[in-house]
Image (cartoon, rainbow, N blue to C red):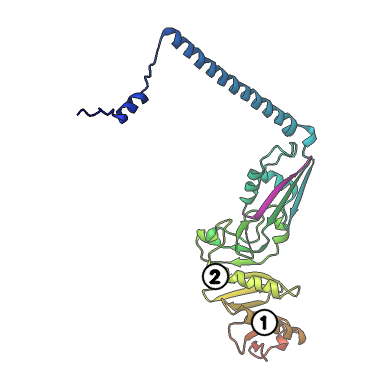
Amino acid sequence: MFKRKKTNTRYTRARQDRMLHLQVSSPRIVMFQSLRAMRGVFKLALVLALLGVGGVYSYNYVQDHFLSSPEFSLRHLELKTNGYLNESEVAKIAQIDPSGTVFSFDIDEAEARLIARPEIVTAAIERRLPDTVRVTIEERVPVAWVACPKLAMSGRNPHSGILMDAEGIVFQCQGKLWDVARNLPVIEIHEAAKDEFELGGKMSHKEAERALSLVNLINEKVRGEWFVKRVAVVNFYSLQVTSNDEVEATFGMYEHERQLGDLIAARRHAAETDRELSWINLLPKHNIPGQFKEPASLSDDGLTSVND
């Protein structure tokens, strides 16, 4: 008995799924393909050319309309500051051309130039169309000079003097700062390294930091009665303060609250007894030694205790 021969279905389907791919090439076909590619390149070049022309036109339009148009000429430079720089000085530092327009400078670059100055803390610039530029800056407020002969730093010098603010940031005396800084106290230091007083940075001299702390305390507690002319670092444990009435007071590096309180009490006592204090050593907590300027009020050895 004969069996019916079965067809291999999988093989048949594979044959049916086969397709014949032929790639025909001829000079004519190659020519048309080249023409098609050239048309694509031409279209791309045309688009780029149009974009270039548009860019040039836009640039010229911006130049004519914003950067050189009289409509946007800089007529008002408004300055808001807590310090002593004026409008012309700020414009010079920020490189803002007073004869240009409000668009003739880059705001970010101008702000960076201002902040780069050690005496400036923050700076913000904004345009107020059509003709105004507003500059808001926060300047450092000086509280003392720094003097150190070995570092060629001299106090109360309008050209080469070095100032510091209440936080100990060091900066040079610039412009009108001299008008307000000429009577500030001088912190005198005998030994110091150059890197301890980097301009624009916070000083790192230990004894000078204690002297500044004392100056800040006196500025806070004493108002109008007398002021400090000089704070000299005598050694590692003491400071000598000279006031505007030539009273010399010896402070320690610490316990300034207590010592300043004793000094104020001694001055009050001298005023109540019609005498003037000459010097006082505030290091002892009791029987504080001192001397008055009026010889008739002193003991035989010229010394007295301000506790008496």
Residue 24, quarter of the rendered image: top left
The answer to whether any part of residue 155 appears in the image is yes
Magenta highlight range: 118-130
Q: How packed is label 2: few (under 14 Cα within 10 Å), some, or many (20 or more)?
A: many
Secondary structure under the numbered disc 2 in the rendered image: helix
Q: Amino acid at mark 2?
A: Glu
Residue named by callout 2: 207
Relative horizontal placement of residue 68, taking residue 28 as reference (left or right): right
Relative horizontal placement of residue 192, taking residue 275 as reference (left or right): left
State which quarter of the image contains the C terminus. bottom right
Secondary structure under the numbered disc 1 in the rendered image: helix
The magenta stretch spans residue 306: no
Residue at image coords 65%, 53%: 159
Q: Amino acid at mark 1?
A: Gly
Residue at image coords 63%, 79%: 257
Residues at marks 1 and 2, CA–CA distance in whole angstroms = 21 Å
Q: How packed is label 1: few (under 14 Cα within 10 Å), some, or many (20 or more)?
A: few
Which of the numbered marks, if any, corresponds to residue 261? 1
Please provide percent x and percent y for residue 94: 67, 45
Please provide percent x and percent y for residue 173: 65, 56
Residue at image coords 60%, 74%: 240
The magenta stretch spans residue 128: yes
